[in-house]
Image (spheres, coloured by chain):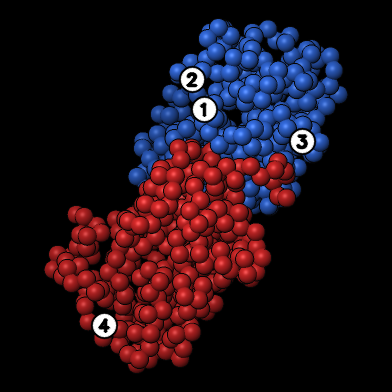
Chain colours: A blue, B red
Amino acid sequence: MKVVIIGSGSWGTALANVLADNHVDVTIYGINEDQVTDINENNQNSFFFKDILLNSEIKATGNFSVVEDADIILIATPSGIVKKICLDLYPILKNPVYIINVAKGFDPDTNDRLQVTIKDNLKEKLKSCISLIGPSHAEEVVIGLLTSVNAVSDDLEAAKIIQKIFSNNYFRVYTNTDVVGAEIGVALKNVMALASGILHGQKQGDNARAALMTRGLAEITRFGVANGADPQTYLGLCGVGDLIVTCTSVHSRNYQAGIIIGQADSADYFLKNNKKTVEGIKACKSVHAKASEIGVEMPITNEIYSVLYEGKKPSEAIDHLMARSLKSEWI
Amino acid sequence: MKVVIIGSGSWGTALANVLADNHVDVTIYGINEDQVTDINENNQNSFFFKDILLNSEIKATGNFSVVEDADIILIATPSGIVKKICLDLYPILKNPVYIINVAKGFDPDTNDRLQVTIKDNLKEKLKSCISLIGPSHAEEVVIGLLTSVNAVSDDLEAAKIIQKIFSNNYFRVYTNTDVVGAEIGVALKNVMALASGILHGQKQGDNARAALMTRGLAEITRFGVANGADPQTYLGLCGVGDLIVTCTSVHSRNYQAGIIIGQADSADYFLKNNKKTVEGIKACKSVHAKASEIGVEMPITNEIYSVLYEGKKPSEAIDHLMARSLKSEWI
């Protein structure tokens, strides 16, 4: 079983390390020459993990033809370029492959879930698509801290193959077949993480954050169910699990972005100067469009959309959310 | 409308401050003379809130007869003495009153929920019982940070009265009529907070904590539903909301206790030296007994019970939880 990981970023590297720890043949394809060299010569990816020694069995290459004879290809890129990767893969693949996607977001062109994009663009070259997603900061996985994630696919047998090659004593993989629910959960929690960071930046505390996450989970569930998800998924690792880890951890880029926006009481400065991938910013736009289309009430997403795309002040957005009339918890 | 709060601790004081901010007539009854004097003379309760000036309309007294002509009595004591308070109140009350309970636990003698204990012991002196519970650290409420909680009662009109007198621009109260579900949720999350602290003490990270809280929420829901709760409650403030705030905040005594137990890899030292109320320790015993009785699977609660009452090492408990066989998320 030969696995190729596309993307030498932090998550791709951490997952390669898990596979190498399990003695699986794994190669990282990366476009950054320094990172490729660092992995091959020093067993490190110092740009992301300073002073961490990776498993020496990991190989890295800048040659895309490495994908040709892969059995499994894992796409570890931002959501926005998953489609491009598929278009690049399509002509070069000789046989159908398993594709693992680990990006958490939507296709920014179509607002589709990423498994839809992958299926639409790889067609007969795709054996099955599996999302490996859940509450998992790369910084912790790479040093062997306990982590649990889902292998999500409508092909349960494929999910079990992925579960088997990744699982070990620190990395636990559970199968899940609710692709719609899980993909929506992990993408939408990034919007809530922006909101959670904004609250923190506005000097609110743990009580407000817990209330936001509670309301956020209800909002994610509402949107998911309207799109055909199983509500139970939101009580699991791709629902509440990933929401918690993203909304409370300093490792989350979305949460960090929210803090800066909250402190400035404006998204302007951040949006003009940010160079990192902050998935929640694009996901918010996709979800806002979809929710309007299908008529789902999304008060938190709407306020974050107004902050990001309509110049609304975060302090006004919070006031607006708080000022809703007193009522029972579920009306 | 005259409100008496029994207990001059941090939560009783913070809630008195909310009521005084809303111009409700409120008196704190406390057994600690220094605290009573501090509140009356300095508008402070310095033992709990250093350098915080309370609303000057709050009165305090050491005379229990203050309860005689109260319309509403709020019990802000540890769970273990709620029954004693009711026994003290019963002979002295002239007319039936609304009782608000804010303790989060079970009656340690009977393993009953606290509203059951209050009803059983106040009988015809009770107009209605309302629990005011949710994700709410006193330290944040007393300085006016945004907080949302539930007023939970089978008497919806009574819950609405409590909602009305407490709500303002920083303290939001939502009504909820699932008493069984809400009381179980806020009590059981203290057991999960012990587990979360133990993970932290054992140097695990945010990924492990998120997985624990996810599995913990499933376990709480399973126990609640087996006792007649509405599962939706666990997606709300008394479920996931209170779980998040308790398992991730430095303000939580249960979480702090777990850290010490985790660091020592033993509960021994903590149990011998602790003098504070750590509700999760007693709640774990009550839930463990009840779960065995009704046959609900509680893997996390069982491990914490073994650590607290059977001398099991936390590191062994974690290994045991992780070693369960690979499977789908919901089997």
Please give the residue where the numbered disc 3 appears in the rendered image.
A160
CA gap between label 2 and label 4 equals 63 Å
Dot 1 falls on a residue whose secondary structure is loop
**Given the image, what chain letter belongs to the residue carrying mark 4?**
B
- Report if the CB atoms under discs 4 and 3 are less than 8 Å apart: no
Q: Residue at x 42, y 89 (%)?
A: B125
Please give the residue where the numbered disc 1 appears in the rendered image.
A143
- The amino acid type found where label 3 is placed reads Lys
Q: Residues within 10 Å of mark 4 (few under 14, many from 20)?
A: some
Please give the residue where the numbered disc 2 appears in the rendered image.
A52
In the rendered structure, the answer to whether residue B93 lies left or right of residue A281 reads left
CA gap between label 2 and label 3 equals 30 Å
Q: Residue at x 36, y 35 (%)?
A: A264
**Given the image, what chain letter belongs to the residue carrying mark 2?**
A
Dot 2 falls on a residue whose secondary structure is loop
- Residue B24 can be seen in this image: no
Q: Residues within 10 Å of mark 2 (few under 14, many from 20)?
A: some
Q: Nearer the viewer, mark 2 or mark 4?
A: 2
**Which residue is more in the foreground, A118 or A73?**
A73
The quadrant holding residue A21 is top right
Q: Earlier in the sequence, mark 2 or mark 3?
A: 2
- Report if the CB atoms under discs 1 and 4 are less than 8 Å apart: no
Q: Do tags 2 and 4 sit on the same chain?
A: no
Q: Residues within 10 Å of mark 1 (few under 14, many from 20)?
A: some
**Which residue is more in the foreground, B99 or A163?**
A163
The image shows residue B150, relative to residue A165, as above or below, that is: below
CA gap between label 2 and label 1 equals 8 Å
In the rendered structure, the answer to whether residue B79 lies left or right of residue A18 reads left
The spot of residue B17 in percent (x, y) is 29, 65
The spot of residue A147 in percent (x, y) is 58, 37
